[in-house]
Image: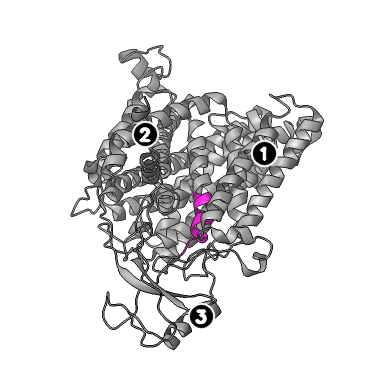
């Protein structure tokens, strides 16, 4: 029976496979894509991804059913949570200018299986998001023509009453997705030009809404007789925040497009900051205008802005708002169809997804096969599925991606940079350093014992702490941590911090409502998990970070990513249990794909181990004698037997 059990060595190798990280090329600017996008192009792509159906539909829905006029506060909190995540994306996008967004960022810092699961969830997020926006686009256009398109389809095609399916096939939604797919296939420059046109029209309509809205504003709509500013209280504001968070998911299109940016080190951080700031301002101001024009409880969730102008006697403005909403939804469709094939391309290029999706058209320099296949799949979703129940699923995938990107920032910041000589734990014997000499591969020879002694003394006196090592100020108090390799303690502390954050947020969300904890146990658990979170944070801070680089770096690490992790986990736990159930099912399907295909075809599997090199090292003992040992430079190799001890005055090679 015991022989059928896996050996510990096999389990170790298997875990190493799951957690291997991507090896980046020396020249990360080299790409098969066309680097043609400027900062303005990326900024408008981000605005187009964020300011879409959410502005015209989400504001009215959250204001009437969840938060009231306090939807403004919900958007502020959601914008702040998105800002923390956006800064993490900005640093990664500048340092790793490769397509793939959260998938790529997780792969280069955390591990392969985590990166695959993030990419797998982002795929579904973009597919459902694009299909949902297409159906909203179709509904808005149909409402302009008094629902004639819907009535014609139900009369001549028919209806069905099947769970998870729409009441009738939406050919208009599927058609717009196929048209958008065709335009996206022509290349990044064509996609960017179309996005510019629709974004300009959309921003013009938003400016009109704000000017007219403030002219028609009535402050009494926020008064106590009308329900007050926050009729649903703090719980309504936080529930509205979890829903409003979906409005800001579009900024990751900038990170996904970094491989097509001319100067990603500058363009990506600036575009993310500009687009997120403008989008947040637009959502806050439009929510303010909407709830001041008419009482919040009279809003029409399906077309709140157009209906508000209509009830104030400006019916002609409703047509202008509807036209602006259609243009805004076009930008979201273009954003989804632009990002999705590039993430699929990144996964296929790494061997974790089917290789056919890694082909780039030689003329348009875009992954045409991925664009066409997933554009058609998105059109089929919009044609037959009822996506209203799945829209909330979008938030959980995005929040999970944001959480892993924030954790990846901490792990990456406390790792040694590429090209640095690996540092050894302070409590262990130093490993041999690469030889220096006129010819590569030659070993440096020391002609006298004094040379060897200078080498050892120099290493002692010239001790420079590398990223991931304990700071000198904390070494007298945390000396036991010196026995770990640089970055090991930080990685464990990040995992501990995330577990503490999950427990802390679970108590906050479910402690009173579902678990019905007594006050003393509720308070005790909050204190314990808060201490665990803070101690993990302090332990990370006690280690050396990477020095400042020429690219953008998020400030206040590890505090800023840690706050992002807590906010994201809290918002995830506020989602319904059905969302978690669907999320679990999709994860299981993803694991089947990974273990059935990805783990065997990963390019990291194909990398041959580097040849071992041999060098000499000398250790001075208190007795004044010298030992010379020979061992492989590569970590993990068995050292050769030590040579016999030599006298102090004798030089041996």
Identify the secondary structure beneath mark 1.
helix
**Which of the pair 644/595 is nearer the observer?**
644
Q: CA distance from mark 1 to mark 2?
A: 36 Å
Give the percent coordinates (x, y) of residue 334. Answer: 37, 44
Identify the secondary structure beneath mark 2.
loop
Prevalent SS, magenta region? helix
Q: Between disc 3 and disc 1, whose residue precedes?
A: 1
In this picture, is 612 found above or below 383?
below
Give the colour scheme shown.
Answer: one colour
Give the percent coordinates (x, y) of residue 564. Answer: 59, 48
In the image, the segment drawn in magenta is: 405-416
Residue visible at 64% across and 47% down?
76
Image position of 236 (left or right of 469):
right
Residue receiving disc 1: 504
Give the percent coordinates (x, y) of residue 366. Answer: 26, 51
Q: Marks 3 and 1: which is nearer the front?
A: 3
Q: Marks 3 and 2: which is nearer the front?
A: 3
Residue receiving disc 2: 6
- Residue 570: name its quadrant: top right
Density class for disc 3 (Cα within 10 Å; few <14, some 14-19, many ≥20) is few
Residue receiving disc 3: 624
In this picture, is 59 found above or below 32?
above
Q: CA distance from mark 3 to mark 2?
A: 48 Å
**Which of the pair 176/500 is nearer the observer?**
500
In this picture, is 648 found above or below 293?
below
| Residue 399 seen in the current view | yes
Are the residues flagged by discs 1 and 2 in contact, CB closer than 8 Å? no
Q: Between disc 1 and disc 2, whose residue precedes?
A: 2
């Amino acid at each position: 029976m015991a022989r059928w059990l896996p050996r510990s060595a096999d389990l170790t190798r298997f875990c190493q496979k799951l957690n291997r990280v991507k090896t980046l090329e020396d020249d990360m600017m080299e790409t098969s894509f066309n680097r043609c996008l400027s900062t303005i192009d990326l900024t408008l792509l981000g605005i187009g991804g964020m300011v879409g159906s959410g502005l015209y539909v989400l504001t009215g829905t959250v204001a009437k059913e969840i938060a009231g006029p306090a939807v403004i506060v919900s958007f502020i909190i959601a914008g702040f949570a998105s800002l923390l995540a956006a800064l993490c994306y900005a640093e990664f996008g500048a340092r790793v200018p490769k397509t793939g967004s959260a998938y790529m960022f997780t792969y280069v810092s955390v591990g392969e299986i985590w990166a695959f699961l993030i990419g797998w969830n982002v795929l579904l997020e973009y597919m459902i998001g694009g299909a949902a926006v297409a159906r909203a686009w179709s509904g808005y256009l149909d409402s302009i023509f008094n629902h004639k398109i819907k009535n014609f389809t139900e009369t001549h095609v028919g209806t069905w009453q099947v769970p998870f399916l729409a009441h009738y096939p939406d050919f208009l939604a599927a058609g717009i997705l196929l048209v958008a797919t065709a335009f996206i296939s022509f290349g990044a420059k064509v996609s960017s030009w179309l996005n510019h046109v629709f974004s300009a029209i959309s921003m013009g309509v938003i400016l009109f809404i704000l000017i007219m809205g403030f002219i028609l504003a009535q402050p009494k709509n926020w008064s106590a007789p009308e329900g007050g500013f926050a009729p649903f209280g703090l719980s309504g504001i936080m529930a509205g925040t979890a829903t409003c968070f979906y409005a800001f998911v579009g900024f990751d299109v900038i990170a996904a497009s970094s491989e097509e940016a001319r100067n990603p080190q500058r363009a990506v951080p600036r575009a993310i900051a500009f687009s997120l700031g403008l989008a947040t301002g637009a959502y806050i101001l439009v929510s303010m205008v909407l709830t001041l024009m008419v009482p919040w409880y009279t809003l029409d969730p399906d077309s709140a802005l157009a209906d508000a102008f209509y009830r104030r006697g400006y019916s002609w403005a409703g047509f202008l708002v509807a036209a602006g909403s259609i243009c805004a939804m076009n930008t979201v469709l273009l954003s989804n169809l632009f990002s999705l094939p590039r993430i699929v391309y990144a996964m296929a290029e790494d061997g974790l997804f089917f290789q056919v999706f890694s082909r780039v058209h030689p003329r348009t320099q875009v992954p045409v096969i991925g664009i066409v296949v997933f554009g058609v799949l998105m059109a089929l979703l919009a044609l037959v599925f009822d996506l209203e129940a799945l829209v909330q699923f979008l938030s959980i995938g995005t929040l999970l991606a944001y959480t892993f990107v924030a954790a990846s920032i901490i792990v990456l910041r406390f790792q040694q940079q590429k090209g640095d000589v690996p540092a050894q734990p302070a409590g262990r014997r130093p490993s041999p350093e690469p030889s220096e000499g006129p010819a590569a591969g030659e070993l440096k020879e020391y002609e006298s014992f004094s040379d060897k002694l200078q080498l050892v003394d120099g290493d002692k006196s010239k001790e420079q702490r590398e990223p991931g090592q304990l700071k000198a100020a904390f070494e007298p108090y945390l000396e036991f941590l010196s026995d770990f390799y640089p970055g090991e303690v930080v990685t464990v502390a990040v995992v501990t911090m995330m577990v503490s954050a999950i427990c802390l947020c679970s108590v906050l969300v479910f402690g009173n409502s579902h678990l019905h904890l007594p006050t003393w146990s509720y308070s005790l658990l909050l204190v314990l998990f808060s201490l665990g979170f803070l101690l993990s944070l302090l332990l990370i801070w006690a280690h050396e970070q990477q020095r400042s680089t020429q690219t953008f770096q998020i400030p206040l690490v590890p505090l800023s990513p840690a706050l992002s992790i807590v906010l994201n986990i809290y918002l995830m736990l506020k989602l319904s249990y059905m969302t978690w159930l669907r999320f679990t099912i999709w994860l299981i399907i993803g694991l089947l794909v990974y273990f059935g295909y990805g783990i065997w075809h990963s390019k990291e599997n194909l990398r041959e181990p580097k040849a071992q090199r041999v060098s000499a090292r000398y250790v001075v003992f208190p007795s004044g004698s010298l030992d010379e040992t020979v061992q492989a430079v590569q970590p993990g190799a068995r050292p050769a037997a030590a040579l016999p001890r030599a006298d102090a005055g004798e030089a041996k090679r």
